[in-house]
Amino acid sequence: MYDEHHHRNISGGGARAAVFGISDGLVSNVSLILGMAGAHSSAASVRLAGVAGLIGGAFSMAAGEYVSMRAQSELMERELEVERRAIQADPEDERQELAALYRSRGIEAALADELSVKMMRNPDLALETHAREELGFTPGNTGKPLQAAMSSFVTFALGALIPLLPWLFTSGNTALVWSIALAAVASVAVGAALSAFTGRSWLWSATRQLLISGAAATVTYSIGHLIGSH
């Protein structure tokens, strides 16, 4: 008997981009907002900075994620094409290469030869096997740049909106306190959610996220206060 288990499909990059997007949006915008507040800026200036940070950061994150994922996908596709041509040009050499790889992993020589022969009979299966064994990925799972970019944009904007919300309805110390409180609660929630992906303790993950957000906000607030005082 064994316990049934399932793995999340994270090959498209959307899950990763979502996790980092909301975390980055929260940390960057609470730092920006508290930096402006620490400099004794007007509520209108803090709101403007927060909105600019949300929009600019979301587009920047989405563009960066798209470009990096697209480049990775194109590199994988190029390597697949190289492997496809090699299989077509010299299938016996590729078969021997596959058999040698199996032998290096502890499979007996006769069985390794038998497996390699069977794999090479089907061109699509041969390509998939070579890609998986040599390149470390499966054809068709080369990433989804657009999905990653959209996920990154939305989640960054969501994270950045949280510390900005109080400044849309109030100002001064009231907005500052609420901004800090919401950011702290959101940091704990993001850290706890992250533990569902990593398998780490939710308390450890939440505490880490809270400390990172708190450290960034404290530094920028202090710098803003120092500059504003002079």
Image: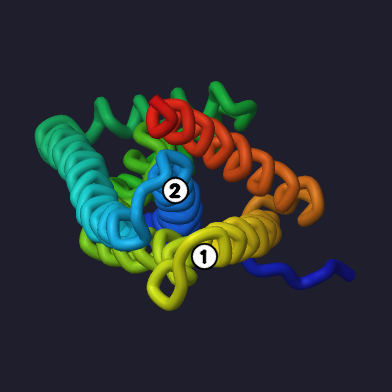
Q: Name the outermost residue toward the front.
A: 230
Q: Residue at x 29, y 55 (%)?
A: 45
> Mark 1 — residue?
175
Foreground of the two, 155 or 8: 155
Residue 179 placement (x, y as % from top left): 54, 61
Residue 144 placement (x, y as % from top left): 27, 59
Q: Is the C-beta separation of discs 2 and 1 under 8 Å?
A: yes
Q: Is residue 201 above or below residue 112?
A: below
Q: Is residue 86 above or below residue 150?
A: above
> Mark 2 — residue?
37
Q: Residue at x 29, y 53 (%)?
A: 49
Q: Amino acid at mark 1?
A: Ala
Residue 134 placement (x, y as % from top left): 38, 32
Q: Is residue 92 visible?
A: yes
Question: In which quadrant is the N terminus drawn?
Answer: bottom right
Q: Is residue 144 visible?
A: no
